[in-house]
Amino acid sequence: MTRAPSGFPVSEPHDEKAGRIRTIEDIRRYLTEELPSSGAAVLTGGLGRRRVRELLGRLGDPQDAVRSVHVAGTAGKGSVCAFVTAVLREHGFHVGTSLSPHVYSLLERFQLDGGPAPVRDVAAALEEVRDRETSLSGGPWGAVSMFEAATAAAFLLFRDHEVDYAVLETGLGGLHDATNTITRPDKLAVLTAIGLDHTALLGRTSPEIARQKAGILPEGGVAVALRGSAEVDQVFAAEAALRGCRLDQVDPARIALPDAVRPGLPGRHQRVNAALAVHAVRCLAERDGWRLDPERIAEGVRRVRLPGRFERRRWRGHPVVLDGAHNPMKLASLVDAVRDEWPGRAPVWVLTVKPDKDLDTALEVVSPAAAAVIATEFSTSGRGRPGGVPASAEEVATAARRAGARAVAEPNLSDALDSAVELSDPDLPVIVSGSFHVVADAVDLGVS
């Protein structure tokens, strides 16, 4: 079996027999070729969520079979999920985790105890989903999307493996998201930092986006939210009151990790994410009657690694950092992390940006921290990653120049990496960022 550097399988021979889903290639083909990708249509009147509820009902409502932690927000969702998973595992619990999007392998969406679930088990869950989805997609509900089918399969997998806790990252927004189908009142909702992203779908302002994210708050349940701007905090409080949900809004300084606890993911923002995750797990422990152990917390936080988050690798012997930060808020956190790691120095950045990500603001964030920006583009297909079109390399380079950076347009990623290495100090890494697509493409090229 072929594996990505992350340890997740990426390719196997396809089993043609009776069209059954058996291998990782069958999984990829079903999710990315047989089904439509998710898009704006999933938010239209909440149709996507209603469709998933119908699908899950036909599967026996697996989303309500286990206790769950449901995470939404603009930045930090995946990291918080990983920290929650790690701390729970260190305390002896069996944990299922579903992350979105994936970077290297579709199996990142189906994890058991911090690693990829067995291919045969994921395949079996998807086979069961397909048996129900086929008739549903032909009716008035419309076609089940790739993300909806994957979410339903993750719920099935976690139920069948009898996990103690399921940890789920929302795909887009929260209110109409396919993951927002859990009805049991003991779901713990976690809201991370809120900023502007997917504005065409979720709203043009932070309060509008916050209202979408707050859609995961459970009726009569409990939630934890990271404090942000006053207007975002007010939206969260109001939405919690409407749902009769007890909301714990926490100041990052109040839940700070002890200085001796070192998260496995670098950056001040990751210390905040880890602290929020630990606070969420503390809520679970108090509710479910078990005790948190400080040493196990520290060990769990230390062990966390995530694909596409500050990954240290090499290209032709030169150090490289891969990070999928893809909006101005996430790029600002990455800039801070790079400055903390290499104070007083400015690395060369290889950057690609989607045109819907506020190009000028993104480059205003990166340019002051960059010795140069090598603008490039990513592939729009491969490994079952959701599609999307990058801004042209010349558009990114022009925005970088407007922001005061030295910039070169190199549409070919291999050429961009070579140019960046040539311009870089030998002991300073090249930072490759702007999209999970470019991170995965870099590994496909041989960054390792």
Image (spheres, grey):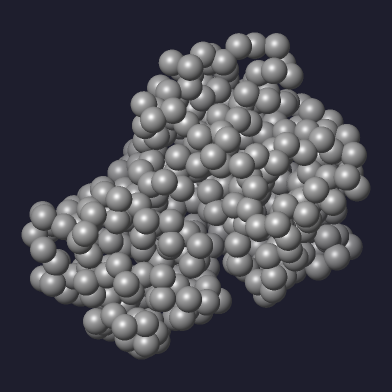
Q: Residue at x 72, y 26 (%)?
A: 67
Q: Residue at x 57, y 20 (%)?
A: 94
Q: Nearer the viewer, residue 166 or 364?
A: 364
Q: Is residue 338 visible?
A: yes
Image x and y of residue 72, in percent? 65, 48
Above or below, 92 relative to 187:
above
Q: Residue at x 39, y 30 (%)?
A: 259
Image quarter where the N terminus lies is top left
Q: Nearer the viewer, residue 177 or 430?
A: 430
Asked where in the image residue 278 lies, by quadrant, the reply is top right
Image x and y of residue 191, in percent? 66, 46
Image x and y of residue 376, in percent? 32, 76
Q: Residue at x 48, y 17 (%)?
A: 294
Image x and y of residue 176, in percent? 78, 56
Asked where in the image residue 198 lies, by quadrant, the reply is bottom right
Q: Determine the residue located farthest toward the top in the rendered image.
A: 290
Q: Nearer the viewer, residue 82 or 367?
A: 367
Asked where in the image residue 160 lies, by quadrant, the reply is top right
Horizontal relation, residue 300 to residue 69: left or right: left
Q: Is residue 8 visible?
A: no
- Please tell me how many numbered marks the rendered image carries: 0
Above or below, 415 relative to 435:
below
Horizontal relation, residue 311 to residue 120: left or right: left
